[in-house]
Image (spheres, rainbow, N blue to C red):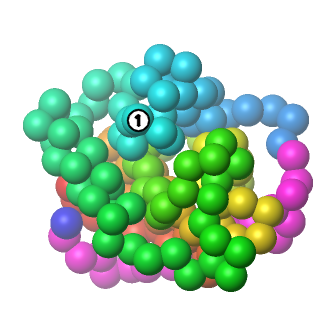
Amino acid sequence: MVPSESVSMTPLLASPSRVYSQSSELVEEVRKCVAEEDFGNSSLVCDPHGRLANTTVEKLQALLGGLSNKIACVCPDGCRRADGSSGYVGLIHVSNSFATRNLSADMASIFRERGLGNSTCNHGLLLAYMKDTQKLAVSLPSLNLSVEKWSRI
């Protein structure tokens, strides 16, 4: 990745329990990946339109899969997800910028829907790569922040 000259940090979401009634295209793309590829469990990369080369997807899958073995659980009640699995989970979704009007809110919704945390601790990582603008957004709810920066994969 190429370092960014401009990094902005903003709170991910003021109220994590807020429910959004209208789904964006970005959220719908993730739901499609869940249905077709078990995204968030057996698949860690969601690229519903095939924007990345297969070799890139394989490398990202291996990189994100390795995180669960390398990052220790720091949650006081453990890191068991609602589906019973445990461990740190990192996911990436590949899309275009026009698929969302509010990236932070959409990422918070995806984080909750994929169950990357539990009721006492958010212990996952969600990345969104906007291929058209080469923008990478990082969501770390355990730190209550999101970071968006220009980058290249």
Which quadrant holds residue 118? Answer: bottom right
Q: Main secondary structure of the magenta part?
A: loop
Q: Is residue 112 magenta?
A: no
> Does residue 17 appear left or right of residue 26 in this picture?
right
Looking at the rendering, the stretch of residues picked out in magenta corresponds to 2-19
Q: Position of residue 108 (x, y in %)?
A: 68, 55
Front-most of 5 and 88?
88
For the point 31% across and 81% down, the residue is 5
For the point 23% across and 39% down, the residue is 57
Residue bearing mark 1: 42
SS of the residue at dot 1? loop
Q: Is residue 8 magenta?
A: yes
Q: Position of residue 89 (x, y in %)?
A: 47, 57
In this rendering, the answer to whether 126 lies above or below 2 is above
Q: Position of residue 61 (x, y in %)?
A: 27, 45
* Residue 127 in view: no
Tell me the quarter of the image containing the N terminus.
Answer: bottom left
> Does residue 2 appear left or right of residue 68 in this picture?
left
Front-most of 12 and 5?
12
**Residue at the outermost top position:** 36
* Residue 56 in view: yes
Within 10 angstroms of label 1, few (less than 14), some, or many (20 or more) residues? Answer: few
**Residue at the outermost left position:** 55
For the point 71% across and 75% down, the residue is 77
Front-most of 65 and 132?
65
In this rendering, the answer to whether 34 lies above or below 44 is above
For the point 62% across and 35% down, the residue is 27
In this rendering, the answer to whether 59 lies above or below 51 is below
Which amino acid type is marked by label 1? Ser
Which quadrant holds residue 100? Answer: top right
Tell me the quarter of the image containing the C terminus.
Answer: bottom left
